[in-house]
Amino acid sequence: MFFDEDDLCETTVTLANQHFTCRQLKEKPSSPLYLPSLQNLEVHSASQEGMQFVLHHLLSPSVIQLNWTIHCPFSKPHVFNTVDHLSTTCLNVRDVTLGWLRANEYLPKGAEGWTQALGDFAVSLPHLQSLRLTRGALSFQHLAQLSQSEIQEIAWPSPAKWAGEVDLYTTPFFPGGFQNLRCLDGVFNETRLLMRLLKEPSLSKGLEKLVLSVKGSTHYEEQEIKEYLAWVAGHHTTLKIFQTTLHSDQPSFYRYQHLRTLGRCKQLTELKFTYDGTMLLVDSELQNIVVGLSNLEKIVLMPYRFDIHTSPPSLTLKSFETLQLCCPKIREIDMYVDAEVRDGVMLQELVDPVAFRANPLANLSSVGFGLSPIQDAGSVMIAKFLRSLTSQPSLNMITIWSSIAPNYFEYKRRKVMWEKVARLIADRNLPWIE
């Protein structure tokens, strides 16, 4: 359903995969105002009137899944009244997504006040199983309270700054807690805090998905990186998804001896490692890591952003042969590799075409190279290489790069060349193998 211009400032509600404004619901005679059996409710509150309409006419104890986003200034009383009403009405909610689209001065303590209010609401839900914040971070107090609940999934997108709230040397943080936790998706402002949380005894029992990012560090010592990844591999053997992003202002170095322990996580289906700095990993070392990861469906080894600190890659296109042999279920590959295939190079020099013809990557649907080095003359050869991997390749062009970096024009040239490759692989007249 499409909205006219007046609707854009209204509260919108999603019911049965259809989007309505509250005005449309009021004016639609066949649509009752009270929906006592409603289980899934998605609300984007753009006005106080609209929010009150939802609270008093659509919200009921039958709601199990709630997605609530506020993107308009609200006064302090409205914030707390909303949270109080949600807490007393949503007694059976199990799945919650909460957030706002912009902070505002009317909220108590700005954005932190709204985060506190959302956290208060979350911990009041007796049957909560999944909590996702789209803005802000959980306080340590709220996390401690949730640890004693039935929670299975927790996610927050902004750096958690708990150093002032807790003694990092207290053991344990959550005695007997998180008995049912399966997914932890969080952002931290320092590795020390992340490591202390990971070493919590109750977190090593049944985690299946671990998504961790560190933002705010200026540099990572190599021993720090090695300890972090070794702990994950050694104490979270049930992991199926591991994703981590390490941001830093200064370049850090990531080596085989840091990453090799991840090969112990035999159940992994997704492995994502994005970083700022230099990845010193060659093709043979990648093979040693993934040789036992036969269930792997997605791999990402890529700089988080391309800037002045991004060094040339050590991996080459030969690494795709490794993934073909070791990871037959692979669906997505995003890797920073040396793709400078020059004019006159035959496809047979990149891969063994006979091997790929006999054992193609049947599940491979998406390949990404970021801003990997590429020569102008090599675009056709790269396109043929990708067509030899699978019959339905798609080139992922999503990447982050700095428009103010000294090598801006080189990055721009690479982006244009990869866009050309994307057009070529879509050409059905391009042969797979010469």
Image (cartoon, rainbow, N blue to C red):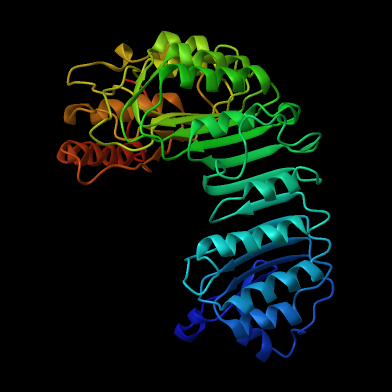
| Residue 357 appearing in the image | no
Quarter of the picture holding the N terminus: bottom right
Q: Is residue 355 above or below residue 381?
A: above
Q: Position of residue 193 (x, y in %)?
A: 55, 34
At x 15% / y 38%, what residue is drawn?
406
Q: Where is residue 319 in the image (x, y as percent from the top left)?
A: 41, 16
| Residue 292 appearing in the image | yes
Q: Position of residue 91 (x, y in %)?
A: 83, 64
Quarter of the picture holding the C terminus: top left
Asked which quadrant contains residue 217, the reply is top left
Label total for image = 0
Q: Position of residue 243 (x, y in %)?
A: 54, 33
Asked which quadrant contains residue 240, the reply is top right
At x 49% / y 81%, what residue is drawn?
9
Q: Is residue 6 above or below residue 164?
A: below
Asked which quadrant contains residue 327, the reply is top right
At x 32% / y 17%, what residue is drawn?
314
At x 60% / y 41%, what residue is drawn?
185
Q: Is residue 335 left or right of residue 268?
A: left
